[in-house]
């Protein structure tokens, strides 16, 4: 796959992980559509990447927004890479609390929409567009990378909806890779542990200290550039398919109270 002729869409493309990814793909010679709900945020970030970054206002859950992002990507290159790294830190309750109040189902659905349906919506529409690309020498037409989390296996108290969505990303990735094999499209996911992004910067000091204790080595938070390294490796390694890869410094998570972010 000749990346210099290619284009990509990164959802959450001005965020921590999405931003590092968009920057890397531009450095590799691609045109990149930076998809964000807020145009101002997308444009301000895209400006830092130069003319090959195309800001766009849109919601990964909205079919028309995604189709429009695909048209923009197709207008500037062979649209062949989709990385989904959108998210919002939302304070969520326990399944039921000690005063007998059950989890608000609307919050559960909101989390599933944001962290599962959105990436699925992006994947299905981008894969359909990739299907019409000319195949490379490996028969490859496109690559999708979704973002799971170590919470997929190690969900903590007050993370029931988030953990369910992230586990579903891992579950869907292998099925998706097998679905899309016929059209030469690969699907992988990255399951980050604590990576230093604006999202983590907003967490309480107690939570940050707790998370850091749980990282085995290197004893620090992950860097968004390390996420971008892994996206690059996935894109450049055609035999890698269907996998959800942990990026977490061998994190092990004992019970950790997931207190809401400081700005929630
Ligand atoms: N940072 C971590 O430690 C970490 C760990 C595990 C998983 N993750 C996952 O990685 C993803 C990105 O996290 P991050 O740390 O970069 O967060 P971030 O807040 O820095 O970036 C997320 C971006 O997504 C955008 N976004 C929100 N809703 C959107 C929508 N509907 N459509 C398109 N874009 C939207 C936001 O505006 C923001 O720019 C999330 O799914 C998160 O759950 C992050």
Image (cartoon, grey):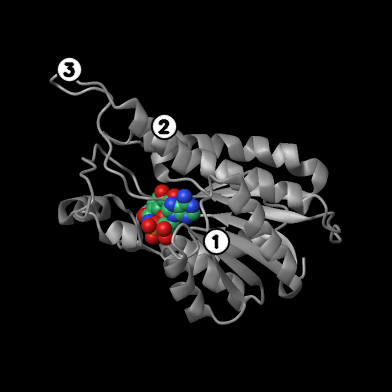
The extreme left residue here reads: 99
Q: Are marks 2 and 1 in contact (CB under 8 Å)?
A: no
Residue 6, disc: none
Picture quarter containing residue 74? bottom right
Q: Which is closer to the viewer, label 3 or label 1? A: 3
Closer to the camera, 212 or 179? 179
In this rendering, position of residue 78 left or right of residue 137 = left
Q: Is residue 159 above or below residue 207?
A: above
Residue 100 marker: 3
Q: Quadrant of the N terminus?
A: bottom right
Q: Earlier in the sequence, mark 3 or mark 1?
A: 3
Please tell me whether mark 1 sits on a helix, a strand or a loop: helix
Q: Which mark is residue 230?
A: 1
Mark 2 burial class by Cα count in 10 Å: few <14, some 14-19, many 20+:
some
* Distance (Cα) linking label 3 and label 1: 44 Å
Q: Earlier in the sequence, mark 2 or mark 3?
A: 3
> Which residue is painted at 37% across and 50% down in the image?
88
Q: Who is closer to the viewer here, 13 or 208?
A: 13
- Dot 2 or dot 1, earlier in sequence: 2
Q: Which residue is mark 2?
A: 109
Real-space CA distance between mark 2 and mark 1, rounded to the nearest whole angstrom: 30 Å
Label 1 Cα crowd, 10 Å radius (few <14 / some 14-19 / many 20+)? some
Q: Is residue 18 above or below residue 60?
A: below
Judge depth for marks 2 and 3 and give the one in front.
Answer: 2
Q: Quadrant of residue 32?
A: bottom right
Tell me which image quadrant ligand 1 sits in.
bottom left
């Amino acid at each position: 796959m000749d990346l210099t002729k290619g284009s990509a869409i990164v959802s959450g493309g001005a965020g921590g992980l999405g931003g590092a990814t968009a920057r890397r793909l531009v450095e590799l010679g691609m045109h990149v559509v930076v998809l964000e709900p807020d145009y101002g945020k997308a444009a301000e970030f895209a400006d830092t990447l130069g003319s090959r970054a195309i800001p766009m206002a849109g919601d990964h859950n909205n079919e028309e927004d995604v189709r429009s992002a695909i048209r923009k990507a197709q207008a500037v290159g062979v649209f062949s890479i989709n990385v989904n790294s959108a998210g919002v830190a939302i304070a969520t309750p326990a399944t039921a609390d000690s005063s007998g109040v059950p989890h608000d189902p609307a919050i559960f659905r909101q989390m599933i929409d944001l962290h599962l349906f959105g990436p699925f919506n992006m994947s299905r529409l981008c894969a359909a567009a990739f299907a019409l690309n000319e195949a490379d020498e490996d028969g490859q037409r496109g690559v999708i990378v979704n973002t799971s989390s170590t919470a997929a296996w190690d969900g903590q108290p007050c993370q029931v909806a988030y953990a369910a969505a992230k586990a579903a990303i891992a579950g869907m990735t292998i099925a998706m890779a097998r679905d899309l094999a016929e059209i030469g499209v690969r699907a992988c996911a990255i399951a980050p542990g604590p990576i230093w992004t604006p999202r983590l910067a907003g967490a309480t000091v107690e939570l940050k200290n707790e998370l850091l204790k749980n990282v085995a080595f290197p004893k620090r938070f992950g860097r968004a550039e390390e996420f971008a390294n892994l996206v690059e490796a996935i894109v450049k390694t055609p035999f890698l398919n269907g996998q959800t890869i942990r990026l977490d410094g061998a994190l092990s998570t004992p019970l950790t109270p997931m207190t809401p972010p400081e700005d929630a």
